Amino acid sequence: MKIGILGSGVVGQTLANGFIKHGHQVKMGTGNPNKLNDWLKAAGSNASIGSFEQAANFGDIIVLAVKGTAALNVLEKSGNKNLADKTIIDATNPIAETAPVNGVLQFFTNQNSSLMEELQSKYPQTNFVKAFSCVGSALMVNPDFGGIKPTMFIAGNNDDAKLQVKGILNIFGWEIEDMGKAEAARAIEPLCILWCIPGFRENRWMHAFKLLKNN
Ligand SMILES: NC(=O)c1ccc[n+]([C@@H]2O[C@H](COP(=O)([O-])OP(=O)(O)OC[C@H]3O[C@@H](n4cnc5c(N)ncnc54)[C@H](OP(=O)(O)O)[C@@H]3O)[C@@H](O)[C@H]2O)c1
């Protein structure tokens, strides 16, 4: 598949490398292409760089991996025609500019809303699926927990889009919990706050969530 990655930070690069490792072609969208020269050299012939618009146009599937405060702006730059009828894997979190309090991140959304719902309502023809937002970048692709698969929580309104994302998550080594429609992002996005607390307080960053079930 052709994957357009909107975002060139550690998440964009990690997921891009993951897609390339699993045989896909990637175009990374950025406003600062020069900073990606080293990545491009290392990533090989299935990697390329472009503007946000070019990456969105390239992708059969799109990954949104930009700073939460910039998400709407980057989608606008990407162009509605390049986003319509496509699946967007939304890895973003609505982290506010203000500093964490005792290790607890602050969000710019409230508990009865989510960033993904806001994006989905602005781009109704695009199929957003929340995924990868509740784990650190170092563990996003084929994480090693001694044979135990951690759980990725996903949500989105379109079942076909979620099926595509489930296929990718399977290959990336995740157990999947589909939490339903876009509103479930109100519960998934804040998992990032919980996930980061051991990091900020004790410099522990190598954990992931696992949903234990007996049915
Ligand atoms: N870091 C993690 O482990 C982790 C884990 C789970 C989820 N997330 C979420 O994933 C997203 C990406 O995180 P990240 O750590 O890779 O990097 P980040 O620093 O949050 O985002 C970097 C990207 O955001 C873009 N950006 C920043 N400000 C912008 C602006 N004003 N206008 C347009 N674009 C702007 C940058 O554009 P340029 O390419 O032009 O520089 C770059 O592509 C975030 O929403 C984060 O909350 C992060």
Image (cartoon, rainbow, N blue to C red):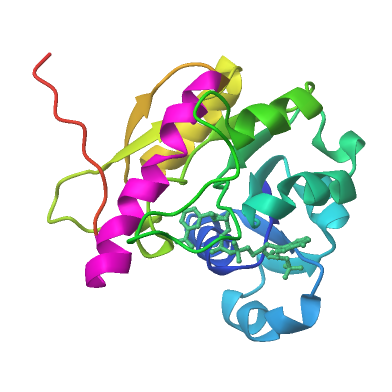
Give the image quarter of residue 202: bottom left
Could you tell me if residue 79 is visible in this image? yes
User: Can you give x and y, in whole percent of width and height, for residue 94 in the image?
Assistant: 58, 46
- Relative to residue 107, is residue 17 depicted above or below? below
Depth check, front residue: 152 or 116 = 116
Within the displayed image, which quadrant is ligand 1 positioned in?
Answer: bottom right
- Relative to residue 97, is residue 155 depicted above or below? above
Report the side of 132 relative to 90 (left or right). Answer: left
Depth check, front residue: 189 or 123 = 189
200 magenta-colored: yes
Q: Quadrant of the N terminus?
A: top right
For the point 77% across and 65% down, which residue is it? 30
Secondary structure mostly seen in magenta is: helix
Give the image quarter of residue 176: top left
User: Can you give x and y, in whole percent of width and height, for residue 171 in the image?
Assistant: 39, 44
The outermost residue toward the top is 215
